[in-house]
Amino acid sequence: MGLPMAKRLLAAGVEVWGFDVRPAEEFGTFGARMINDASEFRARVDTVFSVVRDRHQTFDLCVDDQAVFVGADAPTTLVVSSTLSPRILPEITDRLPDGAIMIDAPMSGAPARAADGTLTFMVGGPDKVVSRMMPLFNEMGTDIHHLGATGTGMTCKVINNFVGVTGVAAVRKAISAARALGLAPAALLDVMKSSSGATWYGDNLDRISWAREGYDPANTIGILEKDMLSFLDAVEGDSSVGVDSFGDAVLDIIRKMEPLEL
């Protein structure tokens, strides 16, 4: 997701530098703007959009292994665009240097919409900081929702992803049922697009780069597992929600997914 987002900003005339532990040549035409030395990256930027995979990578990037936000020349603004449990955000804030500000701005839409500049952003943070970031959000997305204080964007995202992950599991099960009952899966999906069974995943299966993957902890189906766990962490201990067993059932489906053939 980070690469097409960076390309959108660069095309809009924004001075953009990327940071990753992987070699620059893996990033194609953007490789010339990739940096894998934290001190060099830190010296070039004052705002960091973090689009890493999970909690561990977020802490590594910001304050542990790569430690971009450690040192006298640390950036002043962190925008967390990964999907994490909102409970983690105060831990990140506590470890940022004095004067650094964090807002949460997870996004939805998958790489195809990142490339088109049509992402949906769910933003939490102080009005002044969000207003300053808004021109950047508008270059990368078409639906920007400032939902309130820091943490509200991430709260919205994990709830949204709970629905999205459940939809993936349901569509995969529906395809299995169609095969078992002698109905062509492609015909089912075509009908569902204009019926009550419409879902983001089912409707866009041919546009989603990872849609046909089987489960692997390292791939995007593995990210669905992480997203469900982030939601369950966010609601843990709240008996009024009561989704533990349901969430566990969806996780079981995700973890048993085989590559999809239609």
Image: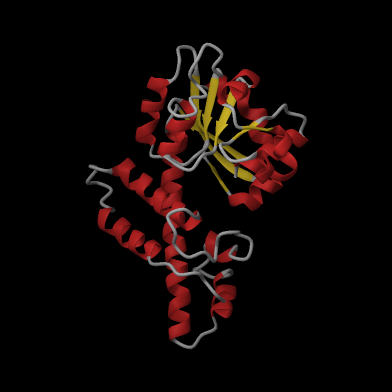
Say which quadrant the N terminus sits in.
Answer: top right
Vertical relation: 231 (above or below) 11: below
At 24% from the left and 46% from the top, the residue drawn is 240
Say which quadrant the C terminus sits in.
Answer: bottom right
Q: Can residue 232 be seen in this view?
A: yes
- Residue 55 location (% of width, % of height): 41, 38
| Nearest to the observer: residue 79 or residue 127 | 79
At 56% from the left and 21% from the top, the residue drawn is 129
Q: Can residue 125 be seen in this view?
A: no
At 65% from the left and 52% from the top, the residue drawn is 112
- Residue 206 location (% of width, % of height): 62, 65
Using the rendered view, name the quadrant where residue 26 is placed. Answer: top right
180 to the left or right of 252: right
Vertical relation: 240 (above or below) 43: below
Looking at the image, the residue that sits furthest to the bottom is: 182
- Residue 138 location (% of width, % of height): 67, 35
Vertical relation: 174 (above or below) 215: below
Vertical relation: 137 (above or below) 26: above
Colour scheme in the image? secondary structure
| Nearest to the observer: residue 117 or residue 33 | 33
160 to the left or right of 230: right
At 45% from the left and 70% from the top, the residue drawn is 258
Number of numbered tags placed on the structure image: 0
Using the rendered view, name the quadrant where residue 215 is placed. Answer: bottom left
Using the rendered view, name the quadrant where residue 8 is placed. Answer: top right
- Residue 195 location (% of width, % of height): 54, 70
